[in-house]
């Protein structure tokens, strides 16, 4: 049974934290006014985590992109339980006034707040809700290992493109298409629980609530695509990486790992290699957490990733590298993951093995690219019988199976980027990718952005990219 926010076991504490959060939101977002990203959306979340329940008061400082009759948000949480609503919204306000709202769409994953906006004007959205976590090894839920994956739990403003994008959650791939935002989170939970999360834990306070020892964490995650946490009993090792003269704090949280220091070394090495190849990692921290994910080897978030347990040590480390590469291709450079998933997943899959190329293990790189080529060819050879479609710019909902999605977005995408590398040479390839990052940093890229980056180095790749996308290339 879903608990209402008003029945929280710690209403006084949440009321105080909510007041503090409201003040902090204005300060946190105003302090970046000199930054070109000053009008990016700010999220302030004040949460209490108890058992299987998150009780949250959330504020959003949002700059309207157009004149509209309302604001649309995604509430992905409801997609993680097919029988009961996961998120129970008790109230919504804009500029301190109650507003009517509708919940609609597939799996009830869209929320519309009925409030007219004017282009360029800021609005303060506040939502009060309870999230009841399902027992599931997915992005949002309590896993079989007792670790709670806390992603997709909060309402997030939909991207605006001549109207709000009302894409619903899809089980294939990563059905997310977000603008860069900043997150300021206060979470209260049992003192004994460990937390791995996006951003930086800036303060920890011990509190006593209803006879229980609790702690309140203050977390800042600025200029990222999203926010997530893993909560539970975890071991931890920490370290630092030197990137472009800056010290990056590294954290690796794990359930079981016989070689945690080696895993941390791989994390550090991946950050360093990709920083040198493409452009410096710009954040203060990077965190990797081990978790159960039944539908993926790992999952990327802003400055934070989760990685599934695997039987193969080599596969596990490559997954760590893959998810680290997503900090460049998804987080720093965004794209429409719903209709052009290859642009981040294909590039990231390529980078997983390009890491070995750049660290002088070129035989490993060659072997893995050959394996990818064979795997894709096995699907493509059976187009008539399987109904396989090798075109790359299409919605997640069009894929018939998870295998087809992986073959097209991961394997074929990786083959495209390796083809470009072989065609233009290592020097121009890296220069083009550095330009791609520089031109689209904190923004959203398309295949035209990629083509433009290569053209800046005197390389016209438009024909090759188009042939891969339209499935006319001979691979």
Image (spheres, helix red, strand yellow):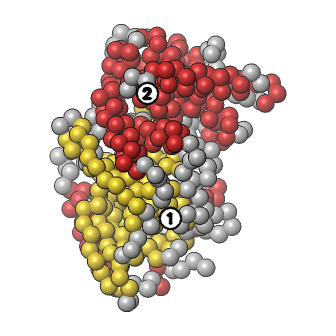
Residue in view at x 35 percent, y 85 percent: 209
Q: Earlier in the sequence, mark 2 or mark 1?
A: 1
Identify the residue at the far bottom of this view.
Answer: 211
Q: According to the image, label 2 marks what residue?
A: 356
Does residue 127 lie above or below 15 as drawn? above
Mark whose residue sits in front, 2 or 1: 2
The quadrant in which residue 221 appears is: bottom left
Disc on res. 3: none
Which quadrant does the C terminus fall into? top right
Q: Nearer the viewer, residue 450 or 228?
A: 228
Residue in view at x 77 percent, y 24 percent: 382
The quadrant in which residue 372 appears is: top right
Q: CA distance from mark 2 to mark 1?
A: 33 Å
Number of numbered tags placed on the structure image: 2
Q: Decide if residue 325 is in sight here.
A: yes
The quadrant in which residue 470 appears is: top right
Which quadrant does the N terminus fall into? bottom right
Estimate the x, y position of residue 49 in percent, counting from the top left.
Answer: 44, 73
Estimate the x, y position of residue 272 in percent, counting from the top left.
Answer: 31, 35
Residue in view at x 35 percent, y 14 percent: 428
**Crowd rating for badge 1 (residues with CA inside 10 Å; few <14, some 14–19, many 20+):** many
Residue in view at x 18 percent, y 55 percent: 31
Does residue 123 lie above or below 401 as drawn? below
**Crowd rating for badge 2 (residues with CA inside 10 Å; few <14, some 14–19, many 20+):** some
Estimate the x, y position of residue 418 in percent, counting from the top left.
Answer: 49, 19
Secondary structure state at the residue bearing disc 2:
helix
Q: According to the image, label 1 marks what residue?
A: 148
Q: Nearer the viewer, residue 99 or 406?
A: 406
Q: Decide if residue 57 is in sight here.
A: no
Secondary structure state at the residue bearing disc 1:
strand
Estimate the x, y position of residue 3 in percent, counting from the top left.
Answer: 53, 80
**Is 101 left or right of 397, judged from the image as shown?**
left
């Amino acid at each position: 049974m879903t608990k209402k926010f008003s029945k929280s076991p710690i209403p006084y504490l949440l009321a105080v934290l909510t007041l503090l959060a409201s003040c902090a939101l204005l300060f946190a977002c105003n302090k970046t006014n000199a930054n070109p990203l000053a009008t990016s959306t700010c999220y302030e979340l004040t949460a209490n985590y108890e058992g299987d329940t998150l009780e949250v008061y959330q504020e959003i400082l949002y700059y309207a992109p157009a004149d509209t009759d309302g604001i649309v948000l995604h509430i992905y949480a409801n997609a993680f339980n097919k029988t009961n609503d996961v998120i129970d919204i008790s109230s919504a306000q804009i500029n301190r006034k109650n507003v009517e709202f509708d919940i609609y769409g597939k799996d009830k994953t869209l929320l519309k707040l009925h409030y007219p906006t004017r282009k360029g004007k800021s609005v303060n959205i506040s939502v009060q809700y309870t999230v009841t976590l399902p027992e599931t090894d997915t992005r949002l839920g309590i896993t079989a290992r007792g670790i709670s994956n806390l992603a997709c739990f909060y309402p997030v403003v939909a991207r605006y493109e001549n109207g709000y994008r009302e894409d619903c959650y899809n089980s294939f791939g990563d059905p997310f298409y977000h603008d860069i935002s900043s997150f300021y989170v206060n979470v209260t939970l049992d003192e004994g629980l460990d937390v791995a999360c996006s951003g930086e834990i800036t303060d920890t306070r011990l509190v006593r609530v209803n006879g229980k020892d609790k702690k309140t964490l203050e977390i800042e995650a600025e200029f990222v695509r999203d926010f997530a946490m893993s909560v539970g009993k975890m071991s931890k090792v920490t370290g630092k990486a030197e990137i472009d003269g800056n010290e990056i704090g590294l954290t690796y949280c794990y359930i079981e790992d016989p070689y945690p220091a080696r895993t941390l070394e791989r994390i550090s090495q991946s950050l360093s290699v990709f920083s040198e190849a493409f452009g410096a990692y710009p954040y203060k921290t990077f965190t990797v957490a081990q978790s159960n994910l039944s539908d993926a080897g790992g999952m990327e978030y802003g400055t934070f990733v989760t990685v599934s347990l695997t039987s193969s040590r080599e596969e596990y480390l490559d997954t760590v590298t893959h998810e680290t590469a997503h900090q460049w291709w998804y987080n720093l450079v965004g794209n429409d993951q719903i209709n052009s998933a290859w642009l981040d997943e294909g590039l990231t899959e390529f980078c997983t093995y390009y890491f070995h190329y750049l660290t002088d293990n070129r035989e490993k790189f060659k072997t893995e690219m050959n394996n990818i080529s064979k795997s894709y060819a096995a699907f493509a050879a059976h187009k008539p019988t399987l109904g396989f479609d090798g075109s790359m710019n299409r919605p997640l909902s069009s894929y018939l199976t998870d295998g087809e999605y992986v073959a097209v977005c991961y394997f074929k995408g990786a083959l495209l980027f390796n083809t470009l590398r072989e065609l233009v040479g290592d020097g121009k390839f890296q220069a083009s990718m550095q330009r791609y990052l520089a031109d689209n940093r904190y923004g959203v890229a398309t295949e035209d952005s990629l083509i433009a980056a290569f053209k800046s180095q005197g390389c016209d790749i438009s024909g090759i990219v188009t042939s891969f996308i339209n499935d006319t290339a001979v691979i």
